Image: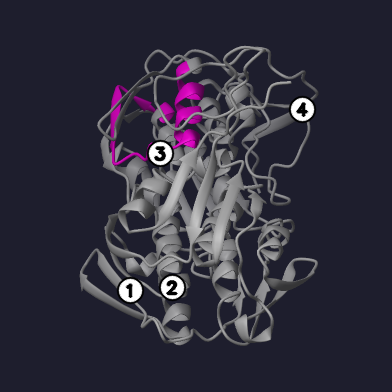
Amino acid sequence: MALFFNITIFPTPKPAKSFISSYSCPKTHISKTPQKPQQSPIFKIKGPSTLSGHITISGSKNSSLALLAATLCCSGSSLLHNVPNVSDIEAMASILSSLGAKVEAFDGKMMVNSDGVGKLQVDLEEMKKIRGGFFVIGPLLARFGEAIVDLPGGCDIGKRPVDLNGKVRAHAANGRGLIGGRFRLDYPSVGATETLMMAASLADGITVLSNVAKEPEVVDLAHFLTDSGAFIEGAGSDNLVIRGQSRLHGSKCVITPDRIEAGTFMLAAAITHSCISMSPVIPSRISCLIDKLLKAGCKISQFDRHILQQSLHVLVTLKGFDIRTSPFPGFPTDLQPQTMALLTTCTGSSLVEESVFDKRMSHVRELQKLGARIRVCGSNALVLGKDEGSSLRGSHLVASDLRGGVSLVLAGLAAEGTTEINNIAHIDRGYENMERKLQYLGADIKRLTPVPCLL
């Protein structure tokens, strides 16, 4: 196996400065004065809710992050359409800008010109906010043969391929540029696959990657790079063959709909016994969830290529089901918390096995505050349904991560009484206008900023 770059880890102090992007999203944790601090907003939900109507699914947050990083591989300008307005995208825009890229955001589009990129080092507070910030190491290595980045932040949901302390310095093994080689990933990590794909697109020679991730976001990235002049074969399979090019050019791309957001709203319809429709949706990307919901008792119809309608009679009780998360095409780990919320309202007991992340059970304690009966053993959970003791009633909750946080929103929609959710900045990282979309469907949900209590 050939090695075409080396990585060195060394400690680094926390950056003192941060870059503020012009890309707007819901703001949190901003203090006006020491005397009158502005507290973080909360969601206040009055349930139970019944939803109806049609919603538009935003562009994929995870695809957008990878494609924004990939613009660093390209000369000239790249235009991305259907980019979601979420805080993770704002952080990535700040990272690109700090490297010297020109980033413009307008009307759901982002234009990135990377001709002015000349820095090798990313030293930003934003790097601590998102895992996707680490993607830039691939393009920087490919362009300059060296890159220095702070280790990424994001949700604390368990071990990931990048779990180190300090700062990463990577450089081409030959001291000049990257050389293609053969790599077999120990685990089909999406982030590792995408980072290596970007680096290999500008490496000298042919790179063969095996046991790679097959997620739709990997396919989206391969399509963008190919449209930009890269040669990539095998996207969506276990193996990738990449013939490096000396130069890539900017291109246009429409971000595909967010499969996790679509799945979240399908689960919202199920937990509230509602009928809603949504578009655009690519059903094949969430077929694992659709199969589970159909077996549980939901009715799901597809009207054309990208419109789904889901309904459930108000008197019908869904049957519980088991899930085991795994890489695509298996059940998505990013839908596990939301599905667990639904299972607390179904009949019977259900087994939830989390095989991707070893700490993705923090939402369990919050669901238990609502009255859910859930027993956890390691990364497995036994969820007892409504006929076995689970009965959701409003409570005060705290979101600890993105997907776990939105699972509390779904539970709040089904719970009797009022539910308040703190730390909703986690939810803002990946859901565009979450409360507005739910309000449009008829939910009684509000974003409130508590009045500070001054002594």
Q: 417 or 131, which lies in front?
A: 417
Quarter in which the C terminus is drawn = top right
Q: 338 or 150, which lies in front?
A: 338
Q: 279 or 388, which lies in front?
A: 388
Q: Earlier in the sequence, mark 2 or mark 1?
A: 2
Do callouts 2 and 1 mark residues in contact (Cβ within 8 Å)?
Answer: yes
Q: Secondary structure at mark 4?
A: loop
Q: CA distance from mark 1 to mark 4?
A: 47 Å
Q: Which residue sits at x=77%, y=29%? A: 9
Q: Earlier in the sequence, mark 1 or mark 3?
A: 3
Q: 307 or 448, which lies in front?
A: 448
Do callouts 3 and 2 mark residues in contact (Cβ within 8 Å)?
Answer: no
Residue assigned mark 4: 166
Q: Residues within 10 Å of mark 2 (few under 14, many from 20)?
A: many
Residue 236 visible somewhere in the drawing: no
Label annotation for residue 67: 3
Residue assigned mark 2: 270
Residue 374 visible somewhere in the drawing: yes
Q: CA distance from mark 1 to mark 3?
A: 31 Å
